[in-house]
Amino acid sequence: MRQTLLGEDLYGEDMLGDDMLGEDLLGEDLLGIDLLGEDLLGLDMSMLKRAGAAAGTGGLSELIRRIKMKKIRKALAMQQRMQHGGLSVRSSPPLLNRVPGVGVPSQVKIPLGFPVITFINGGATLLQTQAQPQVPVRGGRLIIVRQNVGAASPGLNVRLTNLLVGQQSVFASADGIAVETLGPLAVDTVLSLPAAQPGVLVTAQFSISAAPAAAETVTLNMAAMCDSIAG
């Protein structure tokens, strides 16, 4: 009897863990309808008392089963509310606002090219390139091709320090990433960028650890594979 009432069931995971002191009995159920209703001061309370005298009859197990069933019902109810719009679920804004009476346009995948930039001897160590889409786009996969001229240029550290859609930076920190992270053979690099309407500038900013030596260069070609709306 000690194993059942004072062991895993009563003081363990179910009764003093997630269920009794967790969400159900110290959350909505304990301070809400269930504590002052049927379950704890009514049928279940008497069941708990009987379980103390006759643990082998299954009374305590029945109480635990009922508590667990309540958690399942609450989870199912929350899932239904989410499916029917009862809870706010954050999602990306649409590429194109729907117009009543107009059919849904089809979505296509198109490239967005950026002007080529080149780090040269004696030049700036911070450069940027900008693209201005003419149709609504949402960027996904970014591809950067690095071309080195000279023996020492491959050893220079080139980083994408920021990426902006309009004035909104999509980077989580100011440290940037090595351009090789988005190389042509990179994997698992599909991003979820904000939608850019026609005319909005998409800006990529780069840095290099030092200007290339004489007669050496580092050239960057960048493109974004985007979702767009078919015309």
Image: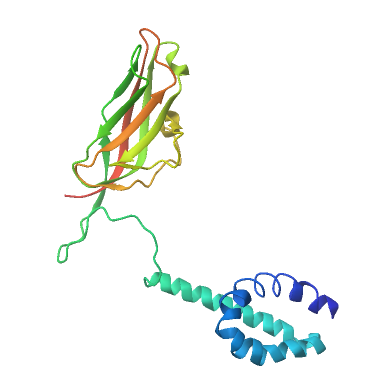
Residue 182 position by quadrant: top left
Residue in the picture at 60% in, 90% down: 38
Residue in the picture at 22% in, 54% down: 96
* Direction from residue 9 to residue 200 in the image, left or right: left
Residue 13 position by quadrant: bottom right
Mark yes or no: residue 150 visible: yes
Residue 90 position by quadrant: bottom left
Q: Give percent across and percent down for residue 140.
A: 35, 44
Q: Give percent across and percent down for residue 152.
A: 45, 12
Q: Give percent across and percent down for residue 221.
A: 32, 27
* Residue most extreme to the left: 101
In the image, 181 versus 162, the foreground residue is: 162
* Direction from residue 41 to residue 57 in the image, left or right: right
Residue in the picture at 43% in, 74% down: 80
> Is 57 located above or below residue 210 in the figure?
below
> Is 199 located above or below residue 127 in the figure?
below
* Residue most extreme to the top: 214
> Is 68 located above or below residue 187 in the figure?
below
* Residue most extreme to the front: 31
* Residue most extreme to the right: 2
What is the quadrant of the N terminus in the image? bottom right
Q: Give percent across and percent down for residue 198.
A: 19, 44
Q: Look at the image and name its color scheme.
A: rainbow
* Direction from residue 200 to residue 27 in the image, left or right: right
Mark yes or no: residue 184 visible: no
> Is 157 located above or below residue 135 in the figure?
above
